[in-house]
Image: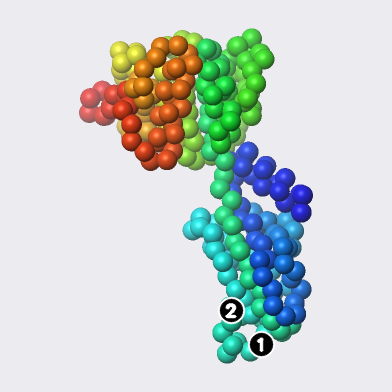
Amino acid sequence: MVEIYEEILKLKKNGKEGVLVCVVDKEGHGPSSTGAKMLVLPDGSRLGTVGGGPLEEIAVKKAEEVLKERKNSLQKYTLSEDNDAKEGEPSGMVCGGNVTLFFEYIKPGVRLYIFGAGHIGKALIYHLKKLNYHITVIDNRKDAVFGIEGADRIITGDYREVLSEEEIPKGGFFVVTTHTHQFDSVVLKRIYQFHCNPRYIGLVASRKKAEAIVRGITGELAKKEINFDILYTPVGLDIGGKTPDEIAISIISEIQSVRFNKGGNHLRVKFHNEQI
């Protein structure tokens, strides 16, 4: 049982999904026992058991449906040949009785990438560490990331190459706050080239700087590659303050508003391909 919960934590940390199947009720005979659990992964592999046999195979197929729909489900199955009893979906088993399974969709953890471990980057990590995000901080300076606490992952390397060898989960959140205009441009371009359909890209920049960076990347990328609807720059909600902590809180407020589909007075300028 411990292994199942450890695997669920691993799924969330790695931005992956799964389905936890639990026996919540049992009547009569059968191989299942109340409280038995099985974790089903998208590739069909499983950990644990809800009793084996035809019932378990049916449960795996149902779990695949839950993965597609991304919704929890409660299903009762009959363990009897007497399907006329209509006490549940037939299972092909003849033990007698019924079993009820709860299928819980395990959502992938929300991935948040911070490019730049300067004053604002560190403030973001500090204020985000108690929220439900898997935080990756990336910088090309080893000394910049020294002593950082609160990030789930720290990467140092060339901004032009980092993350190139791994699959970036879809729907992630990105904040670009490197220490130079040039690196901000490099990173923003790369995020669009990941083709990972981000939910949010926040670029720390003044309006003039933002316009220059956007103009630069639109000259290098195809228009179909750039979704301006997810780009927030100047970044943050207009809540006031100029210190790194205040700016970080403004950015986090904006991220939360996007994540939970709430409104807010955004500082962003809405760009369009026709304007660049």
- From the image, state whether disc 2 or disc 1 is nearer to you: 2
Q: Is residue 212 visible?
A: no
Residue 118, image x, y percentages = 53, 12
- Residue at 65% over, 61% down: 21
Mark sitting on residue 95 = none
Label 2 with label 1: CB-CB less than 8 Å: no
Q: Is residue 69 visible?
A: yes
- Residue at 48% over, 13% down: 244
- Direction from residue 152 to residue 171 in the image, left or right: left
- Direction from residue 154 to residue 30 in the image, left or right: right
Residue 153, image x, y percentages = 64, 27
Per the model, the C-alpha gap separating discs 2 and 1 is: 11 Å
- Residue at 67% over, 85% down: 80
Residue 135, image x, y percentages = 58, 29
User: Up-down: is 11 above or below 255?
Assistant: below
Quadrant for the N terminus, please.
bottom right
Element under disc 1: loop
User: Up-down: is 3 above or below 110?
Assistant: below
Q: Which residue is identified by label 2? A: 88
- Residue at 59% over, 51% down: 106
Quadrant for the C terminus, please.
top left
Q: Which residue is identified by label 1? A: 81
Residue 196, image x, y percentages = 48, 37
Q: Residues within 10 Å of mark 2 (few under 14, many from 20)?
A: some
Q: What's the image's color scheme?
A: rainbow
Element under disc 2: loop
First reached walking from the N terminus: tag 2 or tag 1: 1
Q: Residues within 10 Å of mark 1 (few under 14, many from 20)?
A: some
- Direction from residue 244 to residue 158 in the image, left or right: right
Type of amino acid under label 1? Glu
Type of amino acid under label 2? Gly
